Amino acid sequence: MTKDGKPFWNPYAAGVALGLVVLATYVTMGHGVGAATASFRLGVAAVNAVAPGHVQAVPSLASTVGTRGALDNWLVFEVLGMVLGGALGAWSAGRFGREVARGATFSGGGRIALAIAGGTLMGFAARLGRGCTSGQALSGGALMSVGAWAFMISIFVGGYGAAWFVRRQWR
């Protein structure tokens, strides 16, 4: 599989590798994967660095910091591993570099603005729903949770439906 002459990873090999990662986290940590907790803890650590009084005044933030610090959670290091794994995957596929994936009729700045807006909305929804898409889909799906499967189907149907509205931007 290639795009612009640059190869992508084989999707079946990548899926098997991802499944092995989920299995390894269950075996070693007793929990599935997820990123919402890590990003929340990183945010609390940042706020605590500049406004510790505010963190102590808000019970949910104060309980995250606890006695050992907001970064004292294995999921923080899982997310660091995802960043490093993504870089390794891009490097091994010969695709490591700066690039803004976009259609010919869409500006790079507009694409970045939409990515930031979408990421912010997903982050808010992950905290509101008490879990992120990776935790729901990968961990919940692996446990055959009916709610996780309903969530995954909803994400794919919603994404497919939304694609109709932005399809012209990618031509």
Image (cartoon, rainbow, N blue to C red):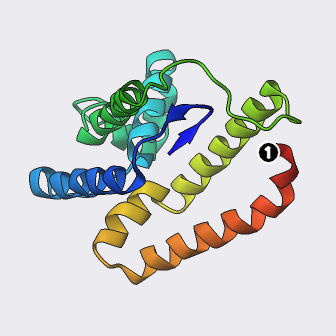
Percent across and percent down for residue 133 are: 48, 58
Residue at far left of view: 28
Residue pictured at 44% horizontal, 17% vertical: 49
Residue in the image at 85% along x and 45% along y: 169
Q: Nearer the viewer, residue 53 or 97?
A: 97
Q: Which residue sits furthest bottom?
A: 146
Tag 1: Cα neighbours inside 10 Å, few (<14), some, or many (≥20)? few
Residue 128: x and y, percent?
A: 56, 58
Number of numbered discs: 1
Q: Of 12 and 64, which appears nearest the observer? A: 12
Query: Considering depth in this image, is 33 or 71 the residue closer to the camera?
Result: 33
Left or right? Give the position of 123 relative to 17.
right
Relative to 170, is 44 above or below?
Answer: above
**Residue 82, quarter of picture:** top left
Query: In the rendered view of the protein, which quadrant contains the C terminus?
Result: top right
Residue plotted at (87% across, 50% down): 168
Q: Secondary structure at mark 1?
A: helix
Asked if residue 121 lies left or right of residue 85, the reply is right
Residue marked by disc 1: 170
User: Mark 1 belongs to which amino acid?
Assistant: Trp
Residue 119, percent from left and from top = 63, 42
Residue 26 in the image: x percent, y percent?
Answer: 17, 58
Residue 98 as seen in the image, left or right of residue 136: right
Residue ID at (52%, 73%):
151
6 to the left or right of 21: right
Above or below for 4 versus 15: above
